[in-house]
Image (cartoon, rainbow, N blue to C red):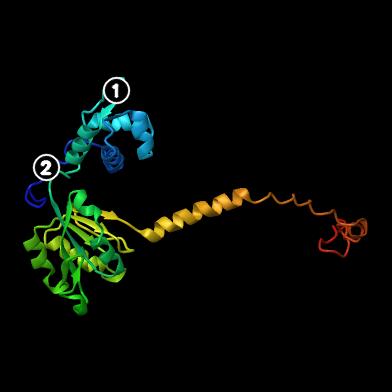
Amino acid sequence: MATGRNHRPATTRSRGIPEATVARLPLYLRALTALSERSVPTVSSEELAAAAGVNSAKLRKDFSYLGSYGTRGVGYDVEYLVYQISRELGLTQDWPVVIVGIGNLGAALANYGGFASRGFRVAALIDADPSLTGKPVAGIEVQHTDDLEQIVDESGVSIGVIATPAGSAQQVCDRLVAAGITSILNFAPTVLSVPEGVDVRKVDLSIELQILAFHEQRKAGEEAPEEEETAPPAAPPAAAVAKRPEPGSDGDRPAVMPA
């Protein structure tokens, strides 16, 4: 099987597929894979759109960029669409991945079993902690960051995953790019600066939780009973009005002197 570093297919970007469509292709693939596992042969655009969480008109337009229009009265062939989308996403070949930062999150990513079934192979694990060097995580020995450039070169990886603390993420990013990495998945809670030609996808769990908290707060506000309208302030008593100094008195406006 070819590796991603040395055998790059024509990408969706070069084929003129919009980035918004590219972002939805994995959603379609996930829904189609579930249908394939249930041995469903065909699916309508409405059914697939509902499973992917988009509207059917958008789905049909997205598939038109792939040259797939389905069959009227029958729908889309599930297995063919799985292959077609997998090919467009570059998942019909092996993509070796390196994970830098083997803390709780990095170790969890290394143990994630879904990578292999989706065209990705964890080729190396790297961490700056000397006590982790040589220890196996998910059956792979952790290597030290001192050897990062050599590891990237020998593993032939083009995709790097950063799961380090924010303070060291940019330095790790710079070293990965210098070593030849051209695509980075960033889990560190910081924005990375990369040169042109390097793609970065950011995953920030705290931001996603904050967005959910915003929606929860709004829902709670909509469910709360409306407060009674506040009455307008009462007019001042007549006695107070009578005591106000008239123009020309000893109050705050001087009297107009006669000519």
The residue under the point 20% across, 49% down is 117
For label 2, the crowd category at 10 Å Cα-Cα, with few meaning under 14, some 14 to 19 and many 20 or more, is some
Could you tell me the amino acid type at mark 2? Answer: Pro
* Disc on res. 9: 2
Q: Is residue 97 visible?
A: yes
The residue under the point 11% across, 50% down is 4
Query: Would you name the residue on which mark 1 appears?
Result: 74
Q: In the rendered structure, which disc, 1 or 2, sits on the residue that comes first in sequence?
A: 2
Percent x, y of residue 61 = 30, 30
Percent x, y of residue 168 = 26, 70
Q: Is residue 40 left or right of residue 248?
A: left
Which element carries disc 2, helix, strand or loop? loop
The residue under the point 24% across, 69% down is 102
Percent x, y of residue 29 = 27, 40
From the image, which quarter does the C terminus lie in? bottom right
Q: Is residue 218 above or below residue 83?
A: below
For label 1, the crowd category at 10 Å Cα-Cα, with few meaning under 14, some 14 to 19 and many 20 or more, is few
Residue 160: quadrant of the picture: bottom left
Q: Give the CA separation, mark 1 to mark 2.
A: 31 Å
Of 76 and 64, which appears nearest the observer?
76
Q: Is residue 164 above or below residue 115?
A: below
Q: Is residue 199 visible?
A: no
